[in-house]
Image (cartoon, helix red, strand yellow):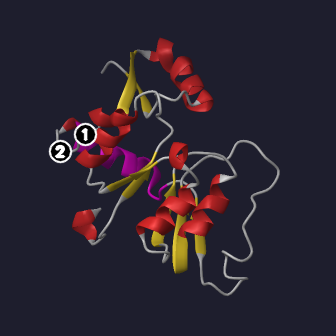
Amino acid sequence: MLKCGADKVSVNSGAIKNPSLIKEAAKKYGATDFVSYKNGPIFQQVLDMTDGKGVDKVVIAGGGVETFAEAVKCLKPGGKIGNVNYLGSGDNIDIPRVEWGVGMGHKQINGGLMPGGRLRMEKLGALVSAGKLDVSPLSTHVFDGWDHLEEALFLMRDKPKDLIKPVVKLAD
């Protein structure tokens, strides 16, 4: 991300059983800062880091519907939220009116899975297979075989505190 023009990359994680786990993985991918809900409201930590200005972009890749309010509060005017998180519960997503700029803050929310579908996943898999992308720092739970698929899916649903990503290895 830093190589693509970002001047600061911050990471938040629920991996509190071993906070150093996520910090070390994040540093390998270029993170410069770390925020944790254990240290107070995320938006306040972000605003403190940016001298109250907020950030240009927020990526939501975990959490629940309440995560949106935090993300909106982190944005500066004209900022963008990218959501790749599945919101499996809750009836509504609250967007704080004032922090949204009372409708005139030019803040944007984009949602959905990454475009490209199968082709993108095949390219990503090829990068991993060729050793050009090391995902091992993110793979906290590794299983062998289809028999463990349900277990991995339940981990994603239950989100234990030591989980970054589960991986199920399949035979060729």
Q: Secondary structure at mark 2?
A: loop
- Residue 49: percent from the left, percent from the top? 42, 66
To which quarter of the image does residue 107 belong? bottom right
Residue 82 vertical position relative to residue 67 in the rendered view, above or below: below
Horizontal side of residue 126 vs 144, given as left or right: left
Task: Identify the amino acid type marked 1.
Answer: Val
Q: Residue at x 59, y 75 (%)?
A: 108
- What residue does disc 1 label? 128
- Residue 150: percent from the left, percent from the top? 56, 19
Label 2 crowd (10 A; few <14 / some 14-19 / many >=20): few
Label 1 crowd (10 A; few <14 / some 14-19 / many >=20): some
Q: Residue furthest right?
A: 91
Magenta span: predominant SS is helix
Spatial distance from mark 2 to mark 1, Cα to Cα?
Answer: 6 Å
- What residue does disc 2 label? 132
The answer to if 68 sits in the magenta stretch is: no
Q: Residue at x 36, y 30 (%)?
A: 139
Mark 2 touching mark 1, by CB under 8 A?
yes
To which quarter of the image does residue 144 belong? top left
Q: Residue furthest top?
A: 147
Q: Which residues are magenta?
A: 114-128
Residue 20 vertical position relative to residue 70 in the rendered view, above or below: above
Q: Residue furthest left?
A: 131
Return the mark for residue 112: none
Task: Identify the amino acid type marked 2.
Answer: Lys
Depth check: 171 or 71 in front?
A: 71
Q: Quadrant of the C terminus?
A: top left
- Residue 38: percent from the left, percent from the top? 53, 42
Q: Secondary structure at mark 1?
A: helix
Residue 74 vertical position relative to residue 67 in the rendered view, above or below: below
